Amino acid sequence: MISIHDNEIISYEVDFQKSKITLNTLGGSGDSDTTYIEFIDVLAHMFETQLQGSIILDISTFDIDRFSKHNKELLEKQKNYGWPMHYETIEDLLEYLQNENYNYYVISASYGFNGWIVAKEYDIYN
């Protein structure tokens, strides 16, 4: 897999219609090649500290149960608004996400942009 450590995020696109998020980055270590990080079958995301010059430290993949544990308050708050989808209980949501093979991706930054994405997979390419 292509390394994204120390890549600078130059832009990103959230395509709700295609359920896809693409991060456009420039390679670290003086590499000027554009690297794309594409999240596929995206259900939900949350980004913070979006700053010019943001640098990626890593993208970690976790089981979906970690998503519900770390975002319980948010899920309870947004439940009646149909976010990230309609569900009766957090347990119902978690069961659906597990059955549909969703993952919890956490984007860590050396500087700036960080957050998480719930999606089925992601790919890195030039």
Image (spheres, helix red, strand yellow):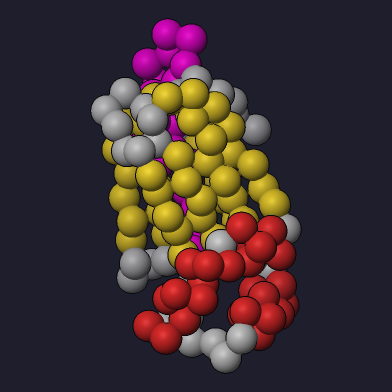
Q: Is residue 43 magenta?
A: no
Q: Which residue is depicted at the point 45% across and 39% down? A: 114
Q: Position of residue 29 (x, y in %)?
A: 48, 10
Left or right for 69, reference 35: right
Residue 17 found in image quarter:
bottom left
Query: As drawn, is 115 to the left or to the right of 61?
Result: left
Q: Quadrant of residue 33?
A: top left
Residues 3 and 74: in front is 74
Residue at image point 32% right, 38% down:
50
**Is residue 41 among what the camera can see?**
no
Magenta residues, start to end: 23-42
Q: At which x and y percent is residue 67?
A: 62, 61
Q: Up-down: is 28 above or below 17?
A: above
Residue 42 in the image: state x and y as whole percent: 48, 63
Q: Is residue 30 magenta?
A: yes
**Residue 60 in sight:** yes
Residue at 33 percent of width and 44 percent of height: 12
Residue 60 higher or lower than 20, as above or below: above
Residue 85: x and y in percent read 47, 80
Residue 54 placement: quadrant:
top left
